[in-house]
C-alpha cells in the first residue's frame, strides 16, 4: 500500500519513481548506477520538480500545488505534459483527484492502477516495469521505456 508521505506537492507519486524504487530494491548492488531517493517529503524537501521555481512549495507553505491560486502554474503544466507523454502519469490529474476525493481515495486508486499483476509491488512510472520481478528487462536495456 502506498504511503501518503510519498505524494509530492506537485502530485508526483514518488513511490512510482525509478530513483525511489532503485533505493527500495537496492539496485546499485545489482549493477545499476542510480540515484537513491526516499521521496520529496521523507527527505525533508518539498518537491524536487517545483521547489526552486515556487516559493510556496519551496518554503513548505502549501501541502499540495492545488492549494495555490495559480494552480496549475506554467511550470506544473510543462512538467505534467512531459510526464503524460513519456511516463503515463498526470500530476495535474493526480492533484485534482486528491482535491476532489481526498488522499485516501487517491492512494487506493493509485494502488490499483500501478500494481504489478505478478507480485503486487508497484510498477515504475519511468519505464513501466516492476523493478522487483522484471529487473532482467532493464538489465538487458538500461534505457528501456514502456514497451521499447
Image (cartoon, rainbow, N blue to C red):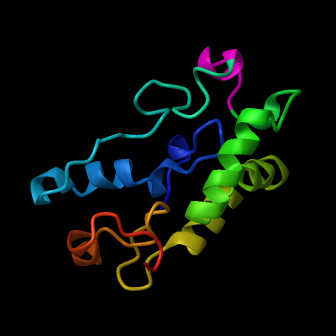
List x then y, in percent, for residue 8.
58, 39
Looking at the rendering, which quadrant does residue 97 occupy?
bottom right
Say if 75 sits above or below 45 in the image. Answer: below
> Is residue 78 one of those drawn in magenta?
no
Disc tally is 0
Residue at 34% in and 55% down:
21
Say if 122 sits above or below 37 in the image. Answer: below
Q: Which residue is outermost to the right?
A: 69
Does residue 126 appear to the left or right of 58 in the view shown? left
Say if 141 sits above or below 54 in the image. Answer: below
Using the image as rendered, state which of residue 3 and residue 139 is in the foreground.
139
Using the image as rendered, state which of residue 39 and residue 135 is in the foreground.
135
Residue at 46% in and 53% down:
15
Using the image as rendered, state which of residue 121 and residue 28 is in the foreground.
28
Does residue 121 appear to the left or right of 113 in the view shown? left
Looking at the rendering, which quadrant does residue 52 occupy?
top right
Q: Which residue is outermost to the bottom?
A: 118
List x then y, in percent, for residue 30.
12, 60
Residue at 44% in and 40% down:
39
List x then y, in percent, for residue 116.
43, 78
Is residue 5 in view? Answer: yes
Residue at 35% in and 80% down:
119
Location of the C terminus (image quadrant)? bottom left
| Magenta segment | 55-63
Is residue 103 in view? Answer: no
Amino acid at each position: 500500500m502506498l504511503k501518503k508521505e510519498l505524494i509530492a506537492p506537485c502530485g508526483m507519486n514518488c513511490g512510482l519513481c525509478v530513483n525511489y524504487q532503485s533505493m527500495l530494491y537496492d539496485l546499485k548492488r545489482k549493477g545499476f548506477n542510480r540515484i537513491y531517493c526516499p521521496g520529496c517529503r521523507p527527505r525533508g524537501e518539498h518537491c524536487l520538480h517545483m521547489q526552486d521555481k515556487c516559493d510556496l512549495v519551496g518554503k513548505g507553505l502549501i501541502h499540495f500545488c492545488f492549494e495555490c491560486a495559480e494552480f496549475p502554474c506554467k511550470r506544473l503544466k510543462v512538467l505534467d505534459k512531459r510526464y503524460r507523454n513519456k511516463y503515463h502519469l498526470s500530476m495535474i490529474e493526480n492533484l485534482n483527484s486528491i482535491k476532489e476525493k481526498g488522499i485516501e481515495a487517491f492512494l487506493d486508486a493509485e494502488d490499483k492502477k500501478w500494481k504489478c499483476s505478478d507480485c503486487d509491488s508497484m510498477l515504475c512510472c519511468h519505464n513501466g516495469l516492476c523493478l522487483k520481478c522484471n529487473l532482467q528487462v532493464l538489465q538487458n536495456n538500461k534505457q528501456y521505456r514502456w514497451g521499447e
